Amino acid sequence: MADFWWSLPGPLEFCRRVAADLDDGSCVVLAVPRAVRSGLAEAVRAQMVDLPLAQWRNIAGSGTEPPGELLADALFAGNSPFTVPTPELLATAEQLSGHVFCLRFELSDSVAWGMWRTFLEKYAQAIRARPVLARSPLLVILQGSSDEVPVREDVCLRVRRWQNCVGELDMLLYCSVLLRGQTTEPFLRALLAGTVASVAGADPELAEFLARESPAMVLDPRVALKNFAAERQWTGHEPNWTDGSLDSIDGVPRVHSCLPGRDPQELQYLLWRAQVTVILPYIEQQRRWLLGKLAGTLRLPFRLKNGTCIDRTEDLEIGHIAYLVGQPQVRGVSESLRQHICALHEARNALAHLETLLPEKILNGALRRAIV
């Protein structure tokens, strides 16, 4: 699913911007959290459609090696023409013209990164003098940087930070694909996808983790979230962008659902929001169906306690229908249909009062017995 993740609108736009920077001959530092989805470099490469495959080079390194020596050894296979491979010499080497070099490492040593920062700034300065198509920009994927700007930007040196890059619609689309085979029932599939998307936030790995759980575990994911937090080795700590426990979605800061110590009401809100988004439209769909099914059975006019008179069938709300079918004089309505109508009414009232429905009410109750 990594390829599909990077094809979503938000992640894809991020990759396109990075690719555009590289196409312009600029070096790019990608500041990403430690838990970033795999496949980022490959997704950026895929957007550079005019770059020959042989001119993209991945260079392995830990980030602690002297930058010039690491690049020279990798690029010249141990036969570097430079006694001292300075950033200026490497940036202007004709043998490297038109290539893009990709390095990725996790920031664990601030001293080592200081060495790389200096190298990158000098390298970017040096390639400015060359024509755009003759430049050999560096793409450095830096995981776990705590600095807002890990390097000083310049004409040929850009910083792209993986933050606020995933929107709610991105995650909903991703979860819809993840849960495609979970059930053939559209209502339940939409509810499970919406719940996973709401809880997962901007974390595709959490979405994949939840999508493997049973429907009951998805609808009440507290145990699953605790297990996922254990896999991440998260304990009670302040949320931070570096380890992926803090991000922004559509411009709104969002603490990761798995972070221990998080207010449990926040999880309830996420579950409620997913249920409202799917169940309320479903109740309206069922209300319209019921009006057709019960045509001639529901007697009008119907007078409310406040004196309001309803004389048109289409004006009956689900609560009105539940009341009418519960009257002894109403015949021809099966007990299972009465239970279904009551379940719809109870669900509507609960959600209207900011209450979430329990999994058993959704999975085993009468709410889904008369699916159209």
Image (cartoon, helix red, strand yellow):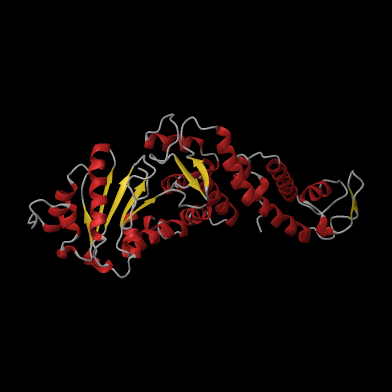
User: 223 above or below 309?
Assistant: above
Can residue 88 be seen here? Answer: yes
Please name whichever residue, 249 or 294, is drawn nearer the observer in this view of the structure.
249
Considering the image in quadrants, where does the N terminus appear?
bottom left
Query: What residue lies at 24% left-to-right and 46% top-to-bottom?
Result: 118
Considering the image in quadrants, where does the C terminus appear?
bottom right
Query: What residue lies at 36% left-to-right and 41% top-to-bottom?
Result: 147
The reply, left or right, for residue 49 in relation to residue 367 is left
Among all residues in the image, which is located at the extreme bottom?
50
User: 51 above or below 121?
Assistant: below
Please name whichever residue, 175 or 157, is drawn nearer the observer in this view of the structure.
157
Please state the horizontal and vertical placement of residue 86, each as a whole percent of the image. Answer: 15, 52
Please state the horizontal and vertical placement of residue 136, each as a whole percent of the image. Answer: 23, 61
Total marks placed: 0
User: 144 above or below 60?
Assistant: above
Please name whichever residue, 45 or 152, is drawn nearer the observer in this view of the structure.
152
Among all residues in the image, which is located at the extreme front?
129
Quadrant position of residue 90: bottom left
The reply, left or right, for residue 232 in relation to residue 123 is right
Please state the horizontal and vertical placement of residue 206, each as a whole percent of the image. Answer: 44, 44
Can residue 109 be seen here? Answer: no
Please state the horizontal and vertical placement of residue 152, each as a whole percent of the image. Answer: 33, 48
Please name whichever residue, 209 or 49, is drawn nearer the observer in this view of the structure.
49
The reply, left or right, for residue 57 in relation to residue 241 is left
